[in-house]
Image (cartoon, coloured by chain):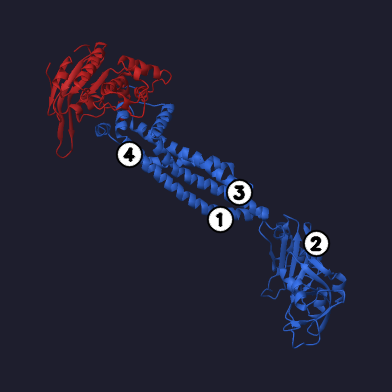
Chain colours: A blue, B red
């Protein structure tokens, strides 16, 4: 007949490990510090990157989020034309989700200069190399053009091919045109154009500000513009993805793949991308700190095993098995990691809140991250305690008792 | 020897160390110790006393021979079974006390109950009872470094008897004490012996051995009963 096997209750394991830890509070505190720093860095990092991501979305340019530009790809090898249609604006404004659409093309006028006077003044330069652009009437709404003075060419100007022009703010300044009440005119080469408006600002297609803009119909008639070059579309917020899929079919149902659609990434994707970059960087830093913390726990636990050889021998004499000894030291190292996790997680949250308060940001932190910190700490402590625990468990009780004398 | 079935039965036990040129720590030791015996094992340093005590306490295994404790052949037992048997049947008193310095006297005593899964509810009460038995209950809340040598050994004895073992193994229990204090500790063993506890005490001091009812000598691993 044999006696029942030696056993120990869970409550005793917990109380013994806590007693073991708090018998040397100073050392335990310093050991835990490594894990605290590591997990505080990790939680603060993730929290700050989430907060920063939220800020990025808050500041994300609403204009960029509602802009689509469509251009034609070069013709295929079989000579298939990918040109945009002349009525591109009309086709797109019929789509639900499109706020405004217009076409814009750069006119190749060779070396022709733009001037305000037919007379060349040798003392002062009067002719300039300026970009000539052709725009459909809808373009000015699509780029949210702000008119400083005058007006913008309408559909009638374009259909009649009238020789009128709108100057960007920078172009008007170079040409010295400040007022329109005297009906100023400019010359593009030898062609005379009446300046009907000056733009103060645009929200898109910023090169318009330094260009001379003429109606598309005029460009078609005078400069043999074969097809619009670019379509600029303003959509409602959140509709860019859908419109970018529908627009090629609306413009070229016969050859939708011949068009190139450019639209900005969704805010969510931008946030994820930014967070991903930040997280990767700081998680690496946090992991290094945690590794150092784990090494610290392993080191101190190993030293503790060596110092407590007599205690190990005594426990074996009192009936502890090798397993009980291993469990005790694993419980101690895991508890150290857990405590470090609780403190580190708390410190990380405080850092996120403090930084956000100073910057007047709204702190954002996934609750799961804060709650995971103690678990991560416990796992690190457990892992760090495996080797020292094995060392403790494999000690022969006789040797352990003898060495402690 | 009293009692029909010996509590301890050593039958030609040998213990050697090393494989190539084995060194004998015990040579064919045979000994029966009945329930309620108090036996002193005397021998010089290196004679094999501690090896014998370790085997009796199930901390070590014989290389050859048979050791029965309370009728159980300990040879085939697993380490876990031996640990269970040890926690229930055997109490240890060491020369160097082996008290945990950062725990109170009562907590040190209660430690003996952890690995036999004794009830946590009345553990403290039973520790105080054990301390009363060694007349140290007034020091229950003290830390060991504040105790005298004799008090420390009393605390160690209280820990050893908490689980009401059948066999008390004492390794030079008065070795670190002055003669007066040592005599008081031996008086305490005498009281326990009268209460029916079986005591095996190893010592190199013949005067200490005189207090036991039986004596055996061990020289170069050979055990022989003297009286």
Tell me residue A365's x, y (percent): 59, 45
Give the SS element for disc 3.
Answer: helix
The residue singled out by tag 1 in the image is A277
Judge if badges 2 and 1 mark residues of a common chain. Answer: yes
Disc 2 element: helix
CA distance separating discs 4 and 1: 41 Å
Label 1 neighbour load within 10 Å: few <14, some 14-19, many 20+: few
Residue behind mark 2: A93
Q: Are marks 3 and 2 on the same chain?
A: yes
Instruction: Judge depth for marks 3 and 1 and give the one in front.
Output: 3
Q: Is residue B186 above or below residue A69?
A: above
Seen in the picture, residue A352 relative to B117 is either above or below; the reply is below
Closest to the camera, between mark 2 and mark 1, is: 1
Residue indicated by mark 4: A391
Q: Chain of mark 2?
A: A
Q: Is residue A105 left or right of residue B206?
A: right
Q: Nearer the viewer, mark 3 or mark 2?
A: 3
Distance CA(mark 3)–CA(mark 2)? 46 Å
The reply to whether the C-beta atoms of the residues labelled 4 and 3 are less than 8 Å apart is no
Kindly identify which numbered label has been placed on residue A358. 3
Residue B39 higher or lower than A405, as above or below: above
For the point 43% across and 19% down, the residue is B121
Q: SS at mark 1? A: helix
Observer-nearest of A1 and B87: B87
Residue drawn where x is 72% and y is 66% of the image = A70
Q: Position of residue A316 (x, y in %)?
A: 31, 29
Q: What is the quadrant of residue A232 in the picture?
A: bottom right
């Amino acid at each position: 007949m044999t006696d029942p096997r030696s056993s120990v209750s869970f409550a005793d394991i917990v109380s013994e490990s806590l007693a073991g830890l708090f018998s040397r509070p100073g050392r335990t505190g310093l050991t835990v510090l490594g894990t605290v720093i590591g997990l505080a860095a990790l939680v603060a990092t993730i929290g700050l990157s989430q907060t920063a991501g939220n800020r990025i979305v808050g500041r994300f340019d609403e204009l960029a989020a509602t802009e689509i530009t469509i251009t034609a790809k070069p013709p295929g090898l079989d000579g298939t034309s990918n040109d945009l249609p002349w009525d591109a604006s009309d086709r797109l404004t019929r789509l639900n989700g499109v706020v405004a659409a217009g076409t814009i093309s750069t006119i190749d006028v060779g070396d022709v200069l733009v001037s305000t006077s037919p007379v060349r003044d040798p003392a002062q330069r009067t002719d300039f190399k300026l970009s000539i652009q052709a725009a459909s009437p809808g373009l000015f709404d699509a780029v949210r053009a702000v008119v400083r003075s005058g007006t913008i060419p309408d559909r009638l100007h374009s259909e009649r091919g009238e020789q009128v022009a709108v100057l960007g703010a920078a172009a008007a300044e170079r040409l010295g045109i400040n007022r329109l009440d005297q009906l100023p005119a400019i010359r593009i080469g030898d062609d005379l154009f009446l300046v009907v408006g000056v733009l103060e600002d645009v929200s898109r297609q910023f090169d318009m500000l330094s260009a001379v803009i003429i109606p598309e119909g005029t460009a078609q008639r005078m400069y043999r513009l074969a097809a619009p070059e670019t379509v600029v579309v303003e959509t409602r917020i959140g509709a860019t993805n859908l419109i970018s899929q529908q627009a090629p079919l609306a413009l070229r149902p016969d050859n939708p793949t011949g068009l190139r659609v450019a639209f900005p990434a969704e805010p969510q994707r931008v946030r994820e991308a930014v967070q991903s970059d930040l997280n990767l960087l700081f998680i690496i830093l946090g992991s290094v700190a945690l590794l150092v913390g784990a090494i610290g726990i392993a080191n101190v636990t190993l030293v503790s095993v060596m110092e407590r050889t007599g205690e190990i021998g005594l426990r074996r004499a009192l009936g502890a098995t090798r397993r009980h000894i291993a469990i005790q030291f694993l419980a101690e190292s895991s508890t150290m990691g857990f405590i470090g996790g609780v403190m580190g997680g708390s410190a990380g949250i405080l850092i996120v809140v403090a930084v956000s308060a100073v910057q007047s940001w709204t702190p954002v932190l996934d609750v799961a991250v804060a709650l995971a910190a103690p678990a991560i700490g416990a796992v690190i402590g457990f892992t760090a305690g495996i080797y020292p625990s094995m060392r403790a468990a494999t000690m022969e009780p006789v040797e352990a008792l003898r060495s402690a004398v | 020897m009293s009692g029909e079935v010996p509590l301890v039965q050593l039958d030609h036990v040998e213990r050697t160390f090393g494989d190539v040129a084995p060194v004998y720590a015990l040579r064919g030791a045979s000994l029966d110790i009945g329930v309620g015996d108090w036996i002193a094992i005397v021998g010089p340093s290196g004679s094999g006393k501690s090896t014998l005590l370790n085997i009796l306490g199930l901390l070590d295994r014989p290389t050859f021979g048979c050791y029965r404790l309370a009728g159980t052949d300990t040879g085939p037992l697993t380490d876990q079974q031996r640990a269970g048997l040890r926690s229930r049947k055997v109490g240890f008193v060491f020369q160097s006390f082996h008290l945990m310095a950062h725990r109170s006297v009562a907590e040190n005593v209660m430690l003996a109950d952890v690995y036999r899964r004794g009830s946590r509810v009345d553990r403290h009460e039973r520790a105080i009872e054990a301390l009363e038995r060694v007349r140290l209950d007034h020091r229950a809340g003290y830390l060991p470094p504040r105790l005298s040598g004799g008090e420390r050994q009393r605390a160690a004895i209280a820990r050893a008897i908490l689980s009401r073992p059948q066999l008390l193994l004492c390794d030079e229990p008065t070795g670190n004490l002055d003669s007066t204090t040592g005599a008081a500790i031996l008086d305490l063993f005498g009281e326990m012996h009268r209460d029916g506890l079986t005591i095996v005490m190893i010592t190199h001091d013949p005067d200490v051995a005189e207090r036991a009812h039986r004596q055996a000598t061990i020289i170069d691993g050979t055990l022989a009963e003297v009286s």
